[in-house]
Image: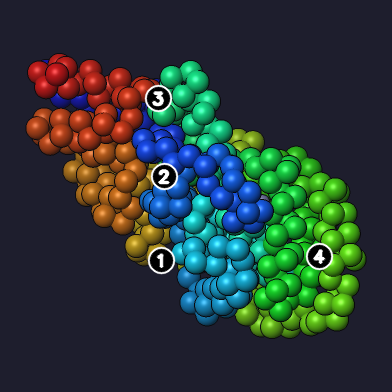
Amino acid sequence: MARRKGLNRREFLWLTSIATSGVVVPSVLTGCAVDPVTGQRRLLLLSEEQEIEIDQSQSPHQFSADYGIYPDDELGRYVRQIGQQVASRSHRSHMPYNFNVVNANYVNAYTFPAGSMGITRGIMLDMQSEAELAALLGHEAGHVNARHAAERATRGMLAQMAVGATAAVAGDGTLGSVVSGVGAISATALLARYSRENEREADRLGMDYMVASGANPQGMVDLMGMLRAMNDRQPGSMEVMFSSHPMSDERYANVQRQLNSDYRSETSRATQRERYMDNTARLRRRSDTIRALRDAEMAIGRQEYSNANAKLAEARRSTPDDYPAWVITAKAQMMQDQPTQAIESLRRARQIQPEEGQAMYLLGINLLSRDDAGGALTEFQRYEQVLPGNPNTRFLVGYSHEQQDNKPQAATAYQDYLRQVQQGQQAEYAFGRLREWGYL
Ligand SMILES: [Zn+2]
């Protein structure tokens, strides 16, 4: 057959879309579990071992989608210390909690079911005290302790069993999903919207835990106030930013009521504003960069590229060695059909944080679109070493081999991919190739 050279626009679009493969549904159902918070038995189809397994296989991909760990060891140590203090006072203090400041610019925090947490540098910038940080980590620990992810997974599994469906979910086939996050795999499913009831419970538990750890409960009220004020300022953008934490006046009122009824006397404690400011001083020197990148990401989302380009230039000017600034620049260049420039930006990004996976992945895609399948293959293989378990990389490895006429290697990678994903355009493509080559 004729060697396929390069990619047309349509192929490039679907190749670079990041198909979500859905949560891998555990085949062993564990039945009722005792809720660690209430002591009541309830139906949960995810065991603690499975929570840990999902947490540890999925969280590295979400951290990479958030541009990896923010490179400030002292800040990382500080957040871990506050997090451990809070988590040690929770109902599930034995869980393998870990607290990570990630490079993302948007204002958010999230947790995986066993306590792997991402706290964005964006929200670290906007918080004002250690008490607020303890409140934020307490809220996330609340989700872990009330086992909200397992509850949601159980609902999803029950729904799937009801319709007899499999777990595969097709990608939407648009380049927009490159911007929304590389390698997020099923993390988006895990981090999907919590119910209001879940949020209320996490707020309440969060305040209990943070106060037990010695923090001032006013931190929770201040945190809610900060998020609410932000919501009033930029209502449109907040829908995106807080999709995993819907904000409302009600939550603010609830935590204020809890403080008044249960923790009045603990409000005399220090909020540790100065200690927080000392520990975030280096981060706050990047505030112009982070805010410019937030604006740039919004502009990219609205496809306002000249505005985005101006904000990106501003971000790179104020911090020339900022990894996310170069990766986001590359994404904007990809969306403007500038793969050569994107390759340059990604190489800069990689010089700054050589072990972070997202730059490798995007570099591979851009090299593919410039007909450099050998170079692309090298990038995808490096990516698989730092972030194993993303089926899309298996597909791209197969495709890179195919472009170099390495059929047996391409077939092996396509077979690996199809073992994990059975639906969508990439699966159809891989299946078609295997059939054409006589493997099926
Ligand atoms: Zn929440």
Q: Nearer the viewer, mark 1 or mark 3?
A: 3
Tag nearer the camera, 1 or 2: 2
Q: Is residue 333 visible?
A: no
Q: Residues within 10 Å of mark 1 (few under 14, many from 20)?
A: some
Q: Residue at x 56, y 33 (%)?
A: 155
Q: Secondary structure at mark 1?
A: helix
Instruction: Say few, some or many: other residues with alpha carbon within 10 Å of mark 4 (under 14 / 14 to 19 / 20 or more).
Output: many
Q: For the residue carrying disc 2, how many other residues have a C-alpha within 10 Å: few (<14), some (14-19), or many (20+)?
A: many
Q: Which residue is mark 4?
A: 222
Task: Point out the tag, 4 or 3, that comes first from the N-terminus.
Answer: 3
Residue under numbered circle 2: 183
What amino acid is found at the position of numbered circle 2 in the picture?
Answer: Gly
| Comes first in the chain, label 1 or label 3 | 3
Residue at the spot 53% in from the left edge and 32% down from the top edge: 156
Q: Earlier in the sequence, mark 1 or mark 2?
A: 2
Answer with left or right where residue 351 lies relative to residue 376: right
Total labels: the figure holds 4
Is 199 above or below relative to 216?
Answer: above
Distance of mark 1 from mark 4, alpha carbons? 35 Å
Q: Earlier in the sequence, mark 2 or mark 3?
A: 3
